[in-house]
């Protein structure tokens, strides 16, 4: 038995090893087989190239034949002269279905360059082509169907070189440096059906597309810096698709009114994505209202749903109006559009989508794009769940974090396909339960009952405006505070009530930012310091220029706001594209200080209190000339200084006159002085020295005004106790000389000082105080 068991064990081990080896070989085969097949395919493809002895071309080009035995050659970073020589020698009698050259250097396409070839499709892209000579395609007139010259450095349309291409059906000259297209530039291309001019900063002449009225079906003017719908498109009777995306069109119709789309009798698709549209009037689509079936208004600045303009498009089937500023969807938004099958509303600050607006589309609507941080998933959206369950609707969203529901928070990670209809409840349901008398115990006071009754009144409204949302939030909090001790309220299986709190409209760096219009202004604790980085603001002539940057990806755009210093409100500039980084404010008032700020387009409540200081700059518009206030200040300072100088001169003159009087009194003989005058001491000096005799100065009427504020008081100079003989008079130590008087009078700042800095020893502080008051008055 033991031998049999060992034999079975060895057999099983061998079998396992064999199985593992087979498995390993299969895995290796699966890993290496695609690589081997690719190498074989590339080798075979290169083997089909008509040249044999050119290693460089074998390394940079791939060739293949189609079922019609037409050659396709695709080269990247190739030596073009070598390739052209090989084609002229080896493929002269071969029809070339596609010649694709990319990322090479061909500065000029010269005359008769393809003389010996028959090319149906020619693409020369990313090759730095600057010039095409007039006869470059002379031999290709009857062969060439598609010509792609995108991503080069052409500065003008090669009109003369294109004239011979009478069989051309596609022309792509996008991503060049073309600045203008003249009248009748394509008039000889009678079979042209597709024209791509995108990503050129071009000016289109009124008749630039004349001659293409009966052939052109697809026109691409994406990113061509158009501010209005160009006049040259009028009369293109065969045009079916028009791409005007990524331009700067602000309103429709344009300056010519109903003639904007005149003569476009076959237009079915219009792309206006990523413009600056803020207004679509009722006659916006006059001329195409009976044919247009697909319309894209994605990523514009529409603050309200253009009900009247959309209502004119009776055959509309696809509408994309996502990522605008819509905060409300009217119930009659699609009343005149019964054929809509695809509708995109995501990216708008819509709190809800009323069923009534789409009820009549329940048999035609197959795709709905809706969602974002502002969407309240409550009972008002139950109809979406029901439509999904009936298999008639697919719901998607281009938003992220959250993709569908913004409120309540615990729904943010879920999609509409995971909901049960009874999970979507409104505040009204829970509020009615909370207010029911049967749920309130006897312990609940009368005042509490009255409070809950007042609270439930505003919640009975089904309004979706921002103000009602804010009110519901506040009253719900009051209810919670009013019944902290309630324990008899029966539990319900429903999801807790939904309070549509104010959303956080700041976005992460990878998110596309929707906009808020009517929600209360609240700032979440999210760092958005790099959303707008103001770099510089300066004056240029009578304008103010501000420059900024942003580190936030996918920002919708910017707006410049400004106010004169002291104003309490901002004036708003036009909306700017996300790529713009500079704005000029013209005709700024002179001799004013202006405060200029840059904000993102998602900021709607703009005031000096809400705009961060780091996003603003103060610019003094007049820096060289003195302002009115400066002139007033200088004049006042000059007047004060002049008054002080005059006062000091008067004081110095009076002091000198007094000194002369004192000196004359001391020089008189003792016998000539009257006894009463000197206290009965005849011929004897005053025991207190010459200073004590100053009391007699009142006898001289001309010095009367200086009696009360003598500059020679006992506080300034100590009095001598006795004198043995009359001494020759000397200048008093406290006597102010001319130099000191002038020095004190030179500074207006010193004249305002009430300290005794200059009062001792020459001038007492009391005198300076009186003089200061006089100057001030």
Image (cartoon, rainbow, N blue to C red):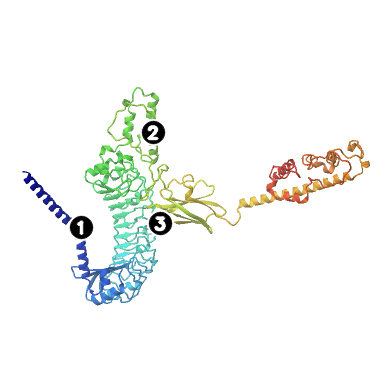
Which quadrant would the C terminus be assigned to in this image? top right
Callout 1: SS? helix
Query: What percent of the width, then of the height, locates residue 691?
Result: 83, 41
Q: How many numbered dots are placed on residues in this image?
A: 3
Query: What percent of the width, then of the height, locates residue 509?
Result: 37, 50
Q: Counting other residues with Cα less than 10 Å from the Cα at mark 3, is it few (<14), some (14-19), or many (20 or more)?
A: few
In front: 695, or 405?
695
Q: Is residue 144 above or below residue 4?
A: below
Instruction: Looking at the image, tell me whether mark 1 or mark 2 is earlier in sequence order.
Output: 1
Instruction: Looking at the image, tell me whether mark 3 or mark 2 is earlier in sequence order.
Output: 2
Q: Which residue is mark 1?
A: 31
Q: Counting other residues with Cα less than 10 Å from the Cα at mark 1, is it few (<14), some (14-19), or many (20 or more)?
A: few
Q: Which residue is mark 2?
A: 477
Callout 3: SS? loop
Which residue is located at x 25 percent, y 77 percent?
Answer: 89
Which residue is located at x 29 percent, y 30 percent?
Answer: 491
């Amino acid at each position: 038995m033991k031998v049999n068991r060992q034999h079975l064990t060895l057999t099983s081990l061998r079998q396992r090893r064999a199985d593992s080896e087979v498995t390993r070989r299969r895995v290796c085969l699966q890993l290496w087989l695609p690589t081997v097949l690719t190498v074989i395919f590339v080798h075979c493809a290169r083997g089909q190239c008509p040249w044999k002895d050119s290693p460089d071309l074998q390394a940079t080009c791939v060739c293949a034949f189609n079922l019609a035995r037409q050659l396709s050659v695709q080269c990247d970073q190739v030596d073009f002269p070598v390739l052209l020589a090989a084609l002229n020698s080896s493929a002269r009698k071969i029809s070339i279905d596609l010649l694709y050259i990319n990322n090479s250097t061909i500065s000029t396409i010269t005359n008769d360059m393809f003389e010996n070839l028959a090319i149906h499709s020619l693409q020369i892209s990313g090759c730095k082509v600057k010039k095409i000579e007039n006869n470059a395609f002379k031999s290709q007139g009857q062969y060439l169907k598609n010509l792609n010259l995108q991503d080069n450095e052409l500065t003008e349309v090669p009109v003369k070189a294109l004239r011979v291409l009478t069989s051309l059906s596609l022309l792509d000259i996008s991503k060049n440096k073309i600045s203008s297209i003249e009248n009748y530039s394509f008039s000889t291309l009678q079979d042209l059906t597709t024209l791509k001019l995108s990503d050129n900063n071009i000016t289109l002449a009124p008749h630039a597309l004349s001659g293409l009225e009966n052939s052109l079906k697809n026109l691409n003017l994406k990113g061509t810096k158009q501010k209005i719908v160009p006049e040259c498109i009028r009369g293109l009777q065969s045009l079916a698709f028009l791409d005007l995306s990524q331009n700067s069109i602000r309103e429709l119709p344009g300056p010519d009114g109903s003639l904007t789309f005149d003569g476009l009798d076959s237009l079915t698709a219009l792309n206006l994505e990523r413009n600056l549209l803020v207004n679509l009037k009722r006659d916006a689509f006059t001329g195409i209202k009976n044919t247009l079936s697909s319309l894209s208004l994605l990523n514009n600045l529409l603050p309200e749903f253009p009900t009247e303009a959309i209502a004119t498009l009776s055959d509309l089937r696809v509408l994309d109006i996502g990522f605008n500023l819509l905060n409300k969807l009217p119930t009659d938004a699609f009343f005149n559009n019964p054929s809509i099958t695809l509708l995109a509303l995501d990216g708008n600050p819509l709190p809800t989508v009323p069923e009534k607006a789409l009820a009549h589309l329940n048999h035609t609507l197959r795709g709905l794009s809706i969602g974002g941080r502002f969407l309240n998933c409550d009972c008002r959206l139950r109809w979406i769940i029901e439509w999904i369950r009936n298999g008639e609707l697919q719901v998607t969203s281009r938003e992220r974090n959250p993709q569908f529901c913004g409120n309540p928070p615990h729904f943010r990670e879920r999609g509409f396909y995971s909901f049960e209809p009874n999970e979507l409840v409104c505040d009204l349901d829970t509020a009615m339960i909370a207010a029911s008398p049967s749920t309130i115990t006897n312990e609940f006071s009368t005042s509490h009952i009255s409070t809950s009754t007042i609270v439930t009144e505003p919640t009975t409204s089904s309004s979706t405006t921002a103000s009602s949302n804010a009110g519901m939030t506040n009253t719900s909090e009051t209810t919670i505070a009013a019944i902290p001790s309630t324990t008899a309220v029966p539990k319900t299986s429903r999801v807790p009530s939904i309070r549509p709190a104010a959303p956080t409209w700041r976005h992460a760096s990878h998110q596309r930012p929707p906009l808020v219009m009517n929600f209360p202004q609240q700032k979440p604790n999210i760092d958005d310091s790099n959303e707008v980085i103001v770099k510089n603001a300066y004056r240029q002539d009578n304008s103010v220029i501000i420059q900024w940057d942003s580190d936030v990806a996918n920002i919708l755009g910017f707006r410049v706001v400004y106010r004169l210093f002291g104003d309490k409100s901002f004036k708003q500039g036009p909306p700017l594209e996300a790529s713009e980084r500079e704005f000029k404010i013209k005709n700024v008032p002179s001799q004013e200080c202006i405060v200029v700020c840059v904000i993102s387009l998602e900021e709607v409540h703009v005031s000096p209190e809400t705009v961060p200081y780091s996003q603003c700059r103060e610019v003094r518009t007049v820096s060289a000339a003195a302002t009115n206030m400066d002139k007033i200040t200088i004049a006042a300072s000059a007047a004060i200084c002049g008054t002080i100088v005059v006062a000091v001169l008067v004081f110095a003159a009076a002091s000198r006159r007094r000194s002369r009087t004192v000196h004359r009194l001391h020089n008189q003989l003792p016998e000539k002085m009257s006894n009463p005058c000197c206290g009965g001491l005849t011929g004897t000096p005053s025991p207190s020295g010459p200073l004590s005799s100053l009391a007699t100065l009142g006898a001289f009427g001309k010095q009367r005004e200086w009696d009360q504020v003598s500059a020679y008081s006992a506080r300034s100079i100590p009095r001598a106790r006795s004198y043995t003989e009359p001494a020759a008079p000397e200048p008093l130590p406290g006597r102010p000389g001319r130099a000191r008087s002038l020095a004190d009078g030179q500074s207006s700042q010193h004249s305002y000082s009430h300290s005794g800095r200059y009062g001792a020893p020459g001038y007492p502080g009391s005198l300076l105080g009186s003089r200061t008051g006089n100057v001030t008055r």
